[in-house]
Image (cartoon, rainbow, N blue to C red):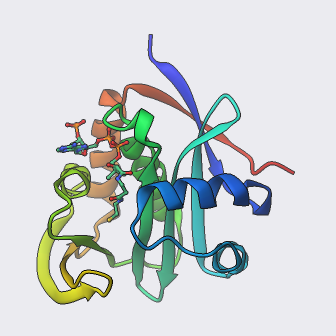
Amino acid sequence: MSLGLEVRRVTPDDLEEICALDQDSFPEPWSRSLWKLELARLHRIYLGAFKATELIGFIGGLLSHTDFHIITVATQKLHRTSGVGSVLLFQMLNEVDDLEEGIETITLEVRASNKAAQGLYRKFGFAPVGLRRGYYQADNEDAIVMTIENLQHRSLTDRLLEIECKLPFTVLVGDAKK
Ligand SMILES: CC(C)(COP(=O)(O)OP(=O)(O)OC[C@H]1O[C@@H](n2cnc3c(N)ncnc32)[C@H](O)[C@@H]1OP(=O)(O)O)[C@@H](O)C(=O)NCCC(=O)NCCS
């Protein structure tokens, strides 16, 4: 039997854990004040994956007209390669699939050297469409732009159902904590 992993919208109450995970996951983490602002902004979806009450992963996305942009995703080092990133992206795309805004593309940038993240995105149907040279200013690394284009809700729903069967966790969708 698969284990349960709670996925829910994050709130300002989760700020400390989000900042800690961000710092542990990225060479250029956001400041606490930027995270605080970001979590309060409109047209964003931020989800956290919780094992018991501990935040072990997060994902963020931005709705911009007909595009949905994946801003960030991270799993705690101890829990990587065990399906947490897949659960997060699965739930995010489920929410995108339920939006009524007429999303046509889902886009993201990923470091050219980040094979783990590229593997995660490919699993969900993202394909590389371009390169942004020197996109990451800290070290001048290129970004690969990946997208799901001409989004057909029917095919996204089918792909998500297919992926759901193989997830190592049962996804428990929770309300944001009050
Ligand atoms: C990218 C990241 C979020 C993946 O999270 P995760 O919880 O390990 O992901 P999963 O276990 O669900 O793996 C999903 C897929 O990613 C790929 N993948 C994950 N880790 C991998 C690795 N070390 N090497 C190669 N492929 C890998 C595989 O295709 C895997 O699918 P599979 O399990 O069906 O084979 C995680 O490595 C991370 O937090 N990295 C640091 C932050 C980061 O780089 N974020 C991405 C920004 S663009």
Image point (72%, 54%), residue name: 14
The answer to whether residue 136 is left or right of residue 51 is left
Residue 76: x %, y % from top left: 47, 43
Q: Nearer the viewer, residue 113 or 82?
A: 113
145, above or below 127, in the image: below
- Is 85 on the left-hand or right-hand side of 120? right
> Where residue 118 sits: x, y (%)?
20, 58
Tell me residue 85's x, y (percent): 39, 46
Relative to 74, residue 70 above or below: below
For the N terminus, the image quarter is: top left
Q: Residue at x 59, y 50 (%)?
A: 48
Q: Is residue 111 above or below residue 1?
A: below
Q: Residue at x 71, y 34 (%)?
A: 53
Image quadrant of residue 4? Answer: top right
Residue 57 image position (x, y, % from top left): 51, 47
* 32 relative position to 107: left or right: right
Q: Residue furthest right?
A: 178
Residue at the far top in the pictured view: 1
Q: In the figure, residue 67 lies in which quadrant?
A: bottom left
- Total marks shown come to 0
